[in-house]
Amino acid sequence: MPELPDVELARRSLRRWLLGAEVHAAVCSDARLTDPAPARLFARTLVGKTVTGISRRGKWLRLELDDGGRMFSHLGMTGGWARLAVEAPPLRFERARIDVVRRGRSSSVRYVDARRFGRLIGAHEDIADWSALGPDPLVDGIDVQGLSRALAKRRRAVKELLMDQRVVAGVGNILATEALWMARLDPRSPGNALLPGDVRALATALGRAIARELAEGRGCGSAEPGSFFVYGRAGEPCPRCATRLSSLVLGGRTSVFCAHCQVRRRARYTSR
DNA sequence: CGGCATGTTGCGCA
DNA sequence: TTGCGCAACATGCC
């Protein structure tokens, strides 16, 4: 599921399902998701509480409760939330459930996660993973100057920097790949070699890539293959110039790009 | 059967 | 201290 648009769509659903709801029962059936806390912390954090807010930063969700408690949810690679009737049997790969009453109607919100890379963390304050996140493109907006400063400090490949959650929160492999193509920038370009215009183009492209996924009412994860410009399309023609799309591995992740129309910036010089 | 996958973390090493 | 490459996590799908 997860990249910023997917998680934002999940937040909107959870807001509809849970805002103002009173939690009558909550169970997490897999301690891997709550590790290192015991799975019962999930229930302890939620049961008897009223949900007062649902927020998102990057790929993290935060349920806020009326006693000051918080439940942080990260979807990992395959996590997602769904609403069912309380009596509905467990979904395939269901790992947790939150049964609520809202406006006199009961429902059951289920967490599903095949690979169990997701997280469910109960706390009474913000966790470090949440607080360490960089600016969120939707919550905070994309600040070109801030992005420029963050990129100029490092010589790592721009794609790796974009996916660093401290630089921009919420950008994953799909968004980074798509935004770099839209900005006509080679993913290998060192962050500190980008020109001011590159960063502006990148900021615009990121905003467009996110808006595109949101507008289609689905995030990257549920998009049918073929709805991306270049992600997953190595070997196919570039939609812009028809050059055969290249693929390489950067920071352990597959990067598809057009070697013809995505400009590769080079390090200007090495100090010392 | 083999290879790949939307994410994150931790380890060894330079 | 920083950065890099890589394995690991667990499972589905093509």
Image (cartoon, coloured by chain):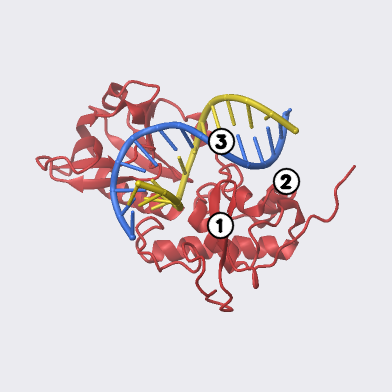
Chain colours: A red, B yellow, C blue
Give the percent coordinates (x, y) of residue B10. 53, 26
Q: Chain of mark 3?
A: A
Residue A255 is marked as 1
Give the percent coordinates (x, y) of residue A193. 76, 56
SS type, badge 1: strand
Nearest to the observer: residue A114 or residue A5 = A114
Relative to A237, say whether A217 is above or below.
Answer: above
Please name the residue that numbered disc 2 is placed on.
A154
First of labels 2, 3 by sequence position: 3
* Residue located at (30% from left, 37% from top): A51
Relative to C12, say whether A212 is above or below.
Answer: below
Residue kind at label 3, given as amino acid type: Ala
Please name the residue that numbered disc 3 is placed on.
A132
Left or right relative to A27: residue A166: right
C-alpha distance separating marks 2 and 1 = 20 Å
Q: Mark 2 or mark 3, which is nearer to you?
A: 2
First of labels 3, 1 by sequence position: 3
Residue kind at label 2, given as amino acid type: Arg
Q: Mark 3 or mark 1, which is nearer to you?
A: 1
The reply to whether residue A194 is visible in this rendering is yes
Residue kind at label 1, given as amino acid type: Ser
SS type, badge 3: loop
Q: Chain of mark 1?
A: A
Quadrant in the picture for the C terminus of chain A: top right
